[in-house]
């Protein structure tokens, strides 16, 4: 037969509670550290995305200038061919 667990007094309960709180605080600190790292990663990703968006805007502007130049060249050729 199993022996009954020894009766724990108020000191044991307080010690167990303190140990549980230490563990929870430790886990909380770990979660906070992971969250901080995640936030840093998200911020870096946002910065990277902003850089990509900026580069896309530059390329779109270049494309717009090339289209305008091509249209102007085509128009000049068409006008020159009708003379």
Image (tube, helix red, strand yellow):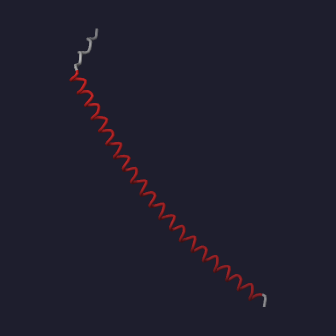
Quadrant where the C terminus is found in the figure: bottom right
Most distant residue in the left direction: 11
Residue 80, above or below 10: below
Most distant residue in the bottom direction: 83
The answer to which image quadrant residue 45 occupies is bottom left
x then y, percent, for residue 68: 64, 78
**Which residue is at 50% across, 64% downward?**
52
x then y, percent, for residue 28: 33, 40
Relative to 15, 81 lies left or right: right
Residue 49, above or below 25: below
Relative to 65, 74 lies left or right: right
x then y, percent, for residue 56: 54, 67
User: Disc count in the image?
Assistant: 0
**Which residue is at 48% across, 60% downward?**
49
Pick whichever, 12 or 62, lies toward us: 12
Most distant residue in the right direction: 82
**Which residue is at 45% across, 61% downward?**
48
Residue 1, above or below 69: above
Pick whichever, 30 or 14, lies toward us: 14
The answer to which image quadrant residue 3 occupies is top left
Most distant residue in the top direction: 1
């Amino acid at each position: 037969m199993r022996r009954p667990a020894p009766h724990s007094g108020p000191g044991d309960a307080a010690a167990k509670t303190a140990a549980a709180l230490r563990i929870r605080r430790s886990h909380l600190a770990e979660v906070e550290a992971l969250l901080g790292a995640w936030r840093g990663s998200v911020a870096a990703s946002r910065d990277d995305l902003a850089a990509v968006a900026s580069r896309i805007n530059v390329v779109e502007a270049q494309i717009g200038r090339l289209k305008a130049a091509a249209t102007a060249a085509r128009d000049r050729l068409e006008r020159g061919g009708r003379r």
